[in-house]
Amino acid sequence: MSDTNDDGPDPRGVKEKLIRTKEQWAKAGRGLTGTTGSPQERRPPGQRVTEDFPVLDLGIQPNLSQADWSLTVGGRVTNAVKWDWAALMAQPQVTLTNDIHCVTTWSRYDNQWKGVAMRTLLEQVKPLPSAKFLMLKSFDGYSTNVPLADIDRDEVLIAHTWQGKPLAREHGGPVRLVVPHLYFWKSAKWLRHITFMDQDQPGYWEARGYHMRGDPWEEQRYG
């Protein structure tokens, strides 16, 4: 969750100084207004609207071609799945427009995405009744957890296109998840693996003080 003028990566590639700073933000409650809103109100509490699309990462941007990319799905499902690029593109494609909201207090309106509806994947893997949560893992080592109830929605998709162009590397290309009704750290970039789980577990930022769910209108920035 960084922007382009953060300090550069350390020798391992991960921006350790930035990570420590954002852990401090969680402890201090940075950005919290103490108010709640409603999804009927377009701008969640404490957010500012920007026309830019800040670059969000840990300091590592995997250089993946379409041929390099694949997605595996397992855990508490009936059918484990592996999609390569051809398999992804063979699925029904959808185009959706939505707003996105970053925990660092920026929001960007009217983002047009193209990809595969998450419900298409759910139909194929058939989650077991015990499946209640997902762990999303990325090619850069990032991870984040999301309740199944927040994934099984019409507006959630596995995206490969933004604003009519292939998703850029810095924004998670070739493929990222988009969960627009939660803070954007839940929309894992460079998506590579999904595990369906019966119990919730923290991902990267959740283990560092951020909320386990992340509803912007409830100001669920931190845990």
Image: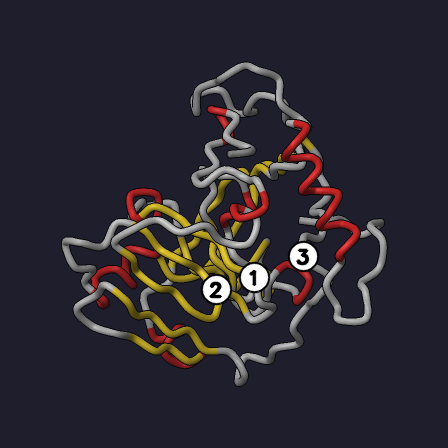
Spot the residue most to the top.
35
- The mark total stands at 3
Q: How is the image coloured?
A: secondary structure
Residue type for callout 1: Tyr
The reply to whether dot 1 and dot 2 touch (C-beta < 8 Å) is: yes
Q: Earlier in the sequence, mark 3 or mark 2?
A: 3
Q: Position of residue 11 (x, y in %)?
A: 81, 71
Q: From this view, report whether residue 48 is shown above or below residue 34.
A: below
Q: Position of residue 29 (x, y in %)?
A: 64, 27
Q: CA distance from mark 3 to mark 2?
A: 13 Å
Residue 193 located left or right of residue 57: left
Residue 74 located left or right of residue 35: left
- Secondary structure category for the residue under label 1: loop
- The quadrant in which residue 83 appears is bottom left
Q: Position of residue 80 (x, y in %)?
A: 26, 74
Q: Which residue is mark 2?
A: 137
- Secondary structure category for the residue under label 3: loop
- Of residues 130 and 56, the one nearer the viewer is 130
Q: Is the residue marked by circle 3 packed among few (<14), some (14-19), or many (20+) residues within 10 Å?
A: many
Q: Which residue is mark 1?
A: 142
Q: Is the residue marked by circle 2 packed among few (<14), some (14-19), or many (20+) residues within 10 Å?
A: many
Q: Which residue is mark 3?
A: 57
